[in-house]
Amino acid sequence: MRKLSVSVLKLTSCSGCLNEVLYSLVARAELLRYLNISYFTELQDSNAIEDVDVAIVEGSIVNSEQEELVKQVREKSRVLIALGTCAVFGGVQSLRAGEDLRTVVLASYPNPDHIKVLPEVKSVDSVVNVDYRFSGCPANGEALARFLVKLVMGGSESPIVESLCSECKRKGILCVTVFDGKPCLGPITLSGCGALCPSFRRGCYGCYGLNALIVDREKLEEFSKVVERLGMSREDFMAMLKAFSYSSLTKSSSSR
């Protein structure tokens, strides 16, 4: 086992993913002994970003300063992890995509001329190379902690890409669509949350992001018709996709 140097970078987000990580790490005192956290602006005064074994990046990129900061962190890290749906897909900040930027800013700030943001929100992997991704809103802190244990022991991660329905099957959860007639985004959403919403007889709303490896534009269009028949408006469906899967949607569109 070896000690890992770690930097944690927060971009534009609600910090929910970082909170989940903190809860998980605090519960693992043994793991903390092997982590040397050199940069974490939410916990300590800002230091110069140093060369580290692992960099964890939470949040989406919304301005040029963040873009340059991510590039700097990438250059100084051996392994870079995108943490949470904002970092992996763009997150809820992407809801402004396609809207007039000044109108959006005026709705939130009294002095819009002081706000300088990029025309579109960017995921971390649209700017730098990402080694591992942990989506979720918030991300599963337990999953990240288990991964850090593997790195400490000299191992790595072998991601299993599957949809949320697989988790429901393993946990014996009756399908909320088949048995309750409720719209559920589980078939098109990445697994990782433990099927939290279906466990409470609620349909998944896709916060872990679109499983783009198995869902293309044609399948997405057909699926939208299914949830519409079950009572979800197309407007709501598209808003969920934009909020939690924006970068996948734009990549899919640009490849056509």
Image (cartoon, grey):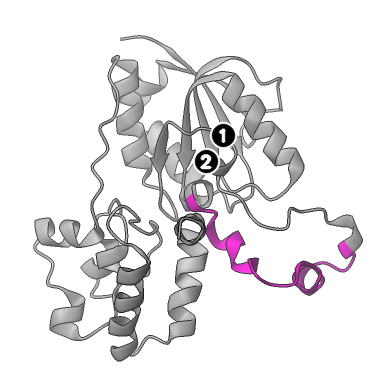
User: Does 254 lie within the magenta span?
Assistant: no
Left of 142 or right of it: where is 104?
right
Q: Are marks 1 and 2 in contact (CB under 8 Å)?
A: yes
Which SS class for mark 2? helix
Locate the N terminus by quadrant: top left
Locate the C terminus by quadrant: bottom left
Instruction: From this view, report whether residue 143 is shown above or below residue 218.
Output: above
Please name the amino acid that badge 2 sits on. Asp
Which SS class for mark 1? loop
Residue 107 picture quarter = bottom right
Instruction: From this view, report whether residue 202 is shown above or below residue 24.
Output: below
Q: Residue at x 18, y 56 (%)?
A: 167
Mark 1 closeness class: few <14, some 14–19, many ≥20 residues within 10 Å: some
Residue 49 x/y as whole percent: 66, 21
Q: Main secondary structure of the magenta part?
A: helix
Residue 154 x/y as whole percent: 30, 14
Which numbered marker is on residue 119? none
Residue 124 x/y as whole percent: 55, 42
Stretch in magenta: 89-112
Instruction: From this view, report whether residue 184 is shown above or below residue 114.
Output: below
Q: Residue at x 29, y 74 (%)?
A: 184
Instruction: From this view, report whether residue 52 is shown above or below residue 205.
Output: above
> Which residue has dot 2 on it?
125
Please name the amino acid that badge 1 sits on. Val
Q: Which of 166/21 is in front? A: 166
Residue 51 picture quarter = top right
> Which residue has dot 1 on it?
128
Mark 2 closeness class: few <14, some 14–19, many ≥20 residues within 10 Å: some
Identity of the residue furthest to the front in this view: 256
